[in-house]
Image (spheres, rainbow, N blue to C red):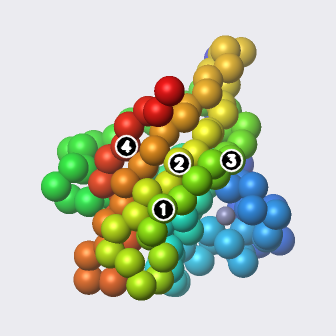
Amino acid sequence: MPKRKHPPRADNAPCPCGSGLHRERCCGPFLDGTSLPPTAEALMRSRYTAFVEGRTDYLLDTWLPRTRPPLLELEPNQQWLGLSIRATSAGGVGDDRGEVEFVARSRIAGRGIRLHERSRFQRVDGRWYYVDGDFPG
Ligand SMILES: [Zn+2]
C-alpha cells in the first residue's frame, strides 16, 4: 500500500481546521512561522492542521518543553475528517493559560476514530504551547 503524501497546500484552499477561512488567512501563517497564534484556540486549530499536513516539526515546536515527547511519529494512513471546537475556557489574548475542548474525527484503514479531548495550553514569553489533555466522558 503506497504511503499517503501530504495534501497539497494551495494558498486559497480552505483551511483544514474547518474554520471556513482560506488556509492563508487562518492556520497557514502559524505553520509557516510568519506569525504566532494569538489565542489558545488558534494554536489548537493550527495543531490540528499540522496533524492533517503531517507537520511533526510544528507539533513539537508548539508543545511545552516540560511535557513534550522526545519524538513524534504520525500514523501515515490516518485520514483526518474534521475538527469541532466544543468549548473554550480562558486562553484569550490577555491570558497565560487556557483550555480548549474539541472533537477531532479521523479514519485509519476504514476505521472511524473520534478523539474527544480537553487540552490545556500555556503561554510562555508570548507564545502559546500545548501542555497536555484529558478525555472527558
Ligand atoms: Zn485554520
Nearer to me, 110 or 67: 67
Q: Residues within 10 Å of mark 2 (few under 14, many from 20)?
A: many
Gap in angstroms between the C-alphas marked 2 and 1: 9 Å
- The residue to which callout 4 is attached is 133
- The residue to which callout 1 is attached is 89
* Proximity of marks 3 and 1: CB atoms separated by less than 8 Å: no
The kind of secondary structure element at disc 1 is: strand
Mark 2 or 1: in front is 1
Q: Amino acid at mark 1?
A: Ser
- The residue to which callout 2 is attached is 101
Gap in angstroms between the C-alphas marked 4 and 2: 9 Å
The kind of secondary structure element at disc 2 is: strand
Q: Which of the two labelled residues, at mark 3 and mark 1, occupies the earlier sequence position?
A: 3
Q: Quadrant of ligand 1?
A: bottom right
* Proximity of marks 4 and 2: CB atoms separated by less than 8 Å: no
- The residue to which callout 3 is attached is 84
Q: Position of residue 41 (x, y in %)?
A: 54, 64
Q: Residue at x 61, y 39 (%)?
A: 103
Nearer to me, 30 or 4: 30
Q: Residue at x 61, y 27 (%)?
A: 114
Gap in angstroms between the C-alphas marked 1 and 4: 14 Å
Q: Residue at x 26, y 60 (%)?
A: 64
